[in-house]
Amino acid sequence: MTTNSDIDRVWRLVDEIRVCMLTSKQGRALRARPMHAIVDREAGEVAFLTDARSHKDDEIAADPEVCLAFAKPGSNDYVSISGTAEVSDDRSAIKAHWSEMAKTWFPDGPDDPNIRLLRVTPHSAEFWEGVSNPFVVAFEIAKARAKHERPDLGEAGKVALG
Protein backbone atom coordinates (compact mmCIF):
# COMPACT_ATOMS: atom_id res chain seq x y z
CA MET A 1 0.00 0.00 0.00
CA THR A 2 1.33 3.43 -0.95
CA THR A 3 1.58 5.96 1.85
CA ASN A 4 2.24 9.67 1.66
CA SER A 5 5.47 9.18 3.60
CA ASP A 6 6.67 6.64 1.00
CA ILE A 7 5.79 9.05 -1.83
CA ASP A 8 7.63 11.83 0.01
CA ARG A 9 10.60 9.51 0.48
CA VAL A 10 10.81 8.72 -3.24
CA TRP A 11 10.72 12.40 -4.24
CA ARG A 12 13.27 13.31 -1.52
CA LEU A 13 15.70 10.59 -2.61
CA VAL A 14 15.39 11.52 -6.29
CA ASP A 15 15.97 15.18 -5.44
CA GLU A 16 19.03 14.31 -3.32
CA ILE A 17 20.64 11.88 -5.77
CA ARG A 18 19.84 13.77 -9.03
CA VAL A 19 21.94 11.62 -11.39
CA CYS A 20 20.27 8.54 -12.78
CA MET A 21 20.53 5.98 -15.51
CA LEU A 22 17.76 6.63 -18.03
CA THR A 23 16.79 3.39 -19.75
CA SER A 24 14.83 3.43 -22.99
CA LYS A 25 14.31 0.92 -25.76
CA GLN A 26 15.95 0.81 -29.16
CA GLY A 27 13.85 -1.80 -30.87
CA ARG A 28 14.00 -4.81 -28.57
CA ALA A 29 17.26 -3.72 -26.94
CA LEU A 30 17.42 -1.70 -23.72
CA ARG A 31 19.77 1.30 -23.63
CA ALA A 32 20.82 3.14 -20.48
CA ARG A 33 22.82 6.30 -20.09
CA PRO A 34 23.56 8.66 -17.18
CA MET A 35 21.46 11.80 -17.03
CA HIS A 36 21.19 14.76 -14.63
CA ALA A 37 17.60 15.02 -13.37
CA ILE A 38 15.63 18.21 -12.93
CA VAL A 39 13.07 17.25 -10.28
CA ASP A 40 9.71 19.03 -10.24
CA ARG A 41 7.46 17.37 -7.70
CA GLU A 42 4.76 20.03 -8.11
CA ALA A 43 4.47 19.13 -11.80
CA GLY A 44 4.88 15.44 -10.96
CA GLU A 45 7.75 15.01 -13.37
CA VAL A 46 11.44 14.39 -13.70
CA ALA A 47 12.95 16.33 -16.60
CA PHE A 48 16.24 16.33 -18.44
CA LEU A 49 17.94 18.53 -20.99
CA THR A 50 19.15 16.28 -23.77
CA ASP A 51 20.80 16.46 -27.17
CA ALA A 52 18.64 15.74 -30.21
CA ARG A 53 21.65 14.14 -31.90
CA SER A 54 21.77 11.37 -29.28
CA HIS A 55 18.69 9.59 -30.69
CA LYS A 56 16.83 9.35 -27.37
CA ASP A 57 13.97 11.28 -28.97
CA ASP A 58 13.65 8.63 -31.71
CA GLU A 59 13.66 5.83 -29.14
CA ILE A 60 11.07 7.56 -26.98
CA ALA A 61 8.84 8.34 -29.97
CA ALA A 62 8.84 4.62 -30.80
CA ASP A 63 8.26 3.50 -27.18
CA PRO A 64 7.77 6.16 -24.48
CA GLU A 65 8.03 3.79 -21.49
CA VAL A 66 11.30 4.40 -19.63
CA CYS A 67 13.03 3.55 -16.36
CA LEU A 68 15.03 5.98 -14.23
CA ALA A 69 17.47 4.25 -11.87
CA PHE A 70 18.95 6.45 -9.13
CA ALA A 71 21.77 5.13 -6.92
CA LYS A 72 23.69 6.57 -3.99
CA PRO A 73 25.89 3.59 -3.10
CA GLY A 74 27.78 5.32 -0.29
CA SER A 75 24.57 5.49 1.69
CA ASN A 76 22.88 2.44 0.12
CA ASP A 77 19.96 4.53 -1.17
CA TYR A 78 18.31 3.57 -4.46
CA VAL A 79 15.19 4.50 -6.42
CA SER A 80 13.80 3.00 -9.60
CA ILE A 81 11.05 4.93 -11.38
CA SER A 82 8.92 3.61 -14.24
CA GLY A 83 7.20 6.25 -16.33
CA THR A 84 6.22 7.69 -19.66
CA ALA A 85 8.60 10.04 -21.44
CA GLU A 86 8.08 12.75 -24.02
CA VAL A 87 10.58 14.94 -25.82
CA SER A 88 9.88 18.59 -26.54
CA ASP A 89 11.54 21.39 -28.49
CA ASP A 90 9.63 24.04 -26.51
CA ARG A 91 12.24 26.80 -26.28
CA SER A 92 10.55 28.58 -23.36
CA ALA A 93 10.41 25.32 -21.36
CA ILE A 94 14.06 24.61 -22.18
CA LYS A 95 15.02 28.08 -20.92
CA ALA A 96 12.90 27.57 -17.79
CA HIS A 97 14.83 24.35 -17.03
CA TRP A 98 18.24 25.85 -17.84
CA SER A 99 20.91 25.72 -15.13
CA GLU A 100 24.62 26.25 -14.62
CA MET A 101 25.01 22.45 -14.80
CA ALA A 102 23.53 22.47 -18.32
CA LYS A 103 26.40 24.68 -19.55
CA THR A 104 28.70 21.68 -19.15
CA TRP A 105 26.97 19.85 -22.01
CA PHE A 106 25.59 22.83 -23.92
CA PRO A 107 28.24 25.59 -23.83
CA ASP A 108 26.33 27.61 -26.46
CA GLY A 109 23.50 28.16 -23.97
CA PRO A 110 19.78 27.43 -23.99
CA ASP A 111 19.36 28.64 -27.58
CA ASP A 112 21.46 25.74 -28.91
CA PRO A 113 19.18 24.22 -31.59
CA ASN A 114 20.14 20.68 -30.52
CA ILE A 115 18.77 20.93 -26.97
CA ARG A 116 15.54 19.11 -26.21
CA LEU A 117 13.55 18.81 -22.99
CA LEU A 118 12.80 15.24 -22.03
CA ARG A 119 10.01 14.94 -19.45
CA VAL A 120 9.18 11.74 -17.58
CA THR A 121 5.82 11.36 -15.86
CA PRO A 122 6.30 8.65 -13.22
CA HIS A 123 3.76 5.83 -12.84
CA SER A 124 5.44 3.89 -10.07
CA ALA A 125 8.62 3.68 -8.07
CA GLU A 126 10.55 1.32 -5.86
CA PHE A 127 12.93 2.58 -3.20
CA TRP A 128 15.58 1.09 -0.98
CA GLU A 129 16.92 3.27 1.81
CA GLY A 130 19.70 1.34 3.46
CA VAL A 131 22.10 1.35 6.33
CA SER A 132 25.35 3.05 5.32
CA ASN A 133 27.60 2.38 8.30
CA PRO A 134 29.72 -0.68 7.38
CA PHE A 135 30.00 -1.76 11.03
CA VAL A 136 26.22 -1.73 11.42
CA VAL A 137 25.86 -3.69 8.17
CA ALA A 138 28.38 -6.29 9.38
CA PHE A 139 26.64 -6.54 12.76
CA GLU A 140 23.19 -6.94 11.19
CA ILE A 141 24.48 -9.65 8.82
CA ALA A 142 26.19 -11.54 11.65
CA LYS A 143 23.09 -11.27 13.85
CA ALA A 144 20.84 -12.47 11.03
CA ARG A 145 23.07 -15.45 10.29
CA ALA A 146 23.13 -16.43 13.96
CA LYS A 147 19.33 -16.25 14.17
CA HIS A 148 18.75 -17.75 10.69
CA GLU A 149 16.85 -14.59 9.70
CA ARG A 150 17.20 -11.92 7.07
CA PRO A 151 19.28 -8.90 8.10
CA ASP A 152 17.60 -5.55 8.77
CA LEU A 153 19.56 -3.32 6.40
CA GLY A 154 17.02 -0.59 5.81
CA GLU A 155 13.61 0.03 4.33
CA ALA A 156 12.18 -0.72 0.93
CA GLY A 157 8.84 -0.10 -0.68
CA LYS A 158 6.78 0.16 -3.84
CA VAL A 159 4.95 3.38 -4.57
CA ALA A 160 2.21 4.31 -7.05
CA LEU A 161 2.92 7.80 -8.39
CA GLY A 162 0.44 8.28 -11.20
Image: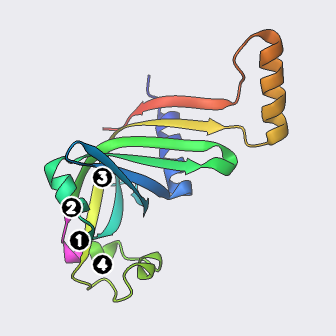
Q: Is residue 75 left or right of residue 106?
A: right
Q: CA distance from mark 4 to mark 3?
A: 18 Å
Q: Give whichever of 5, 21 is nearer the camera.
A: 21
Q: Position of residue 146 (x, y in %)?
A: 83, 13
> Is disc 1 in contact with disc 4, using a CB cutoff of under 8 Å?
no
Whether residue 36 appears in this view of the structure is no
Point out the frontmost of discs 4 and 2: 2
Identify the image quadrant of the N terminus: top left
Q: Amino acid at mark 3?
A: Val
* Mark 1, residue position: 52
**Mark with earlier residue (2, 1):** 1
Q: Residue at x 28, y 74 (%)?
A: 94
**Mark with earlier residue (1, 4):** 1
Within the magenta stretch, is there residue 9? no
Whether residue 60 appears in this view of the structure is yes
* Mark 2, residue position: 57
> Is disc 2 in contact with disc 1, using a CB cutoff of under 8 Å?
yes
Q: Residue at x 79, y 16 (%)?
A: 145
Point out the frontmost of discs 1 and 3: 1
Q: Residues within 10 Å of mark 3 (few under 14, many from 20)?
A: many
Q: Residues within 10 Å of mark 4 (few under 14, many from 20)?
A: some
Name the element at disc 2: helix
Q: Amino acid at mark 2?
A: Asp
Q: Amino acid at mark 1?
A: Ala
Q: Which mark is residue 95?
A: 4
Q: CA distance from mark 3 to mark 2?
A: 12 Å
Which residues fall within the magenta stretch? 88-92
Q: Residue at x 84, y 28 (%)?
A: 139
